Image: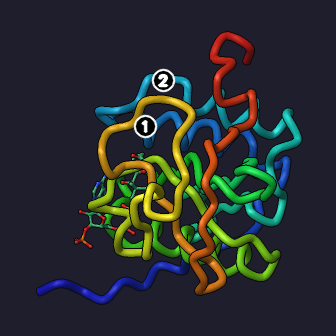
Amino acid sequence: MKQPSTEQIVIRQETPADYRAVFDLVSRAFGNAEHADGDEPYLVGRLRKSGAVIEELSLVAEVDGQIAGHILFTEVRAGDTVQLALAPLSVLPVRQNRGIGSLLVNAGHERGKRLGYDYSIVLGNPGYYSRFGYFPAGRIGLKAPFPVPDGCFMVHPLQGKTPVISAIVEYANAFFQKDAC
Ligand SMILES: CC(C)(COP(=O)(O)OP(=O)(O)OC[C@H]1O[C@@H](n2cnc3c(N)ncnc32)[C@H](O)[C@@H]1OP(=O)(O)O)[C@@H](O)C(=O)NCCC(=O)NCCS
């Protein structure tokens, strides 16, 4: 019989003291992911340096005091609006499928809503992100600035409204500077 978990999961803002553990966590989370290219932990570092990271939206999940999950949202431009991009999201392989990723996504959404953003944008697996209310970004007029598989470029309305934004999303340069870590 499945035993109830006694783990204490705490979601909190990342601090500089977490950077090393987060690098290790992101490396391990993406280590076996089929779409990963090994750049993910360096991307996190570049995004921090770029200023695109919103500190309140750089979150870690601690399980019994150990960092087991991390999520980052950065600002992106979409037409004359500023929205959030969710990337990357990482959970330690040994801690996956216990709801940690969901806790991080939901905590980020709550904070993003409070900060007044209309949308969180993600490039990811619809099988995972649709559970949080993400739907294809094309429905509100948004396009990715690079080729994406059908249905994988998605938005989640944070304020409960779905304003049309006919624009190509402009990501922080750090997303594209893979050799500059
Ligand atoms: C994707 C990831 C963050 C999910 O975190 P998690 O804590 O394991 O997820 P949760 O426990 O909240 O959710 C588990 C559910 O998500 C599903 N799921 C997990 N990864 C998935 C994926 N890549 N695609 C589709 N569904 C996925 C599980 O099958 C499970 O489904 P169920 O609720 O129907 O049983 C984690 O698996 C991870 O770090 N993966 C490697 C890095 C990665 O791919 N990040 C996402 C980049 S967009």
> Pointer 1: what residue?
30
Residue positioned 53% across, 57% down in the render: 141
Q: What's the amino acid at mark 1?
A: Phe
Q: Where 116 falls versus 58 (above or below)?
A: below
> Is residue 150 toward the left or the right of residue 175 in the image?
left
Whether the residues at callouts 2 and 1 have beta carbons within 8 Å, the answer is yes
Name which quarter of the figure residue 28 lies in.
top left
Secondary structure, mark 1, is helix
- What residue is drawn where x is 63% and y is 37%? 23
What percent of the width, then of the height, locates residue 165? 63, 60
- In the picture shown, does residue 146 fall above or below 64? above
Furthest residue to the left? Answer: 1
Residue nearest the viewer, comparing 89 with 134: 134
Give above or below for 106 relative to 3: above
Q: What type is the residue that disc 2 sits on? A: Gly
Q: Name the residue under label 2.
A: 38
Q: Looking at the image, which is closer to me, 76 or 105?
A: 76
Looking at the image, tell me whether mark 2 or mark 1 is earlier in sequence order. 1
